[in-house]
Image (tube, grey):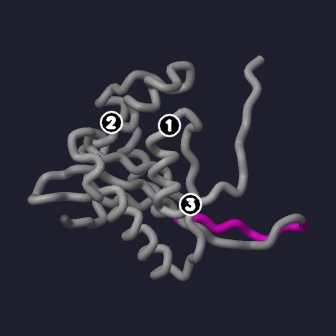
Amino acid sequence: MKISQTKDFQLVAKLNEYVHGLHSNLYPAHFKEYNHENVKAGFKSLFQNERFIFLLVEDDGEAVGYAWIETREYPENPFKKAYKSVYVHQISIVDTKRNKGYGSSLMKRIEEIAIEKGIDVLELDYWSGNSVAKQFYQNQDFTKYREFVHKQL
């Protein structure tokens, strides 16, 4: 298994199909159907932002997943102390390659990147109906410290 930073937005757009499909199936009111050309254009734009890092996981030369992370700085204000975090936007593993340790390996690499940057906080969010993500992140020792709720009117 190899994990490396990638600039290949086209490959990431292709690997995004699984997680995007999951989101659009769970929350069709919020997510559009996966459209490769639109997703590719979106990732092309995202790859221009220097705060974003895209990690590619490969096995025997085959791309099996990716992680999209961001380094964030929260300045001090009258209400909160300043801090930095590495925010995990997405992890996507090809459906046929799940439960083989690729996601866990990506998380380990993300932790290493945070430590290399002197950051001691990883943050992320996931949709409450995504039980797979919830279980995965619990297994990675993430704990809930804030809840985001909504009310449909």
Identify the residue at image location x=36%, y=61%.
104
Residue 58 location in percent, x, y? 19, 58
Label 3 – label 1 distance at C-alpha: 15 Å
Label 2 – label 1 distance at C-alpha: 13 Å
Q: Is residue 77 magenta?
A: yes
Q: Which residue is mark 1?
A: 130
Q: Amino acid at mark 3?
A: Phe
Q: Amino acid at mark 1?
A: Asn
Q: Is residue 128 above or below residue 84?
A: above
At mark 2, the secondary structure is: helix
Residue 29 location in percent, x, y? 56, 19
Q: Mark on residue 142?
A: 3
Q: Amino acid at mark 2?
A: Tyr
Give the quadrant of residue 25: top left
The residue closer to the viewer here, 117 or 138, is 138
Q: Which residue is mark 2?
A: 18
Q: Is residue 113 above or below residue 31?
A: below
Stretch in magenta: 71-78
**Does label 3 or label 1 sit earlier along the sequence?**
1
Left/right placement of residue 9 relative to residue 79 reads: left
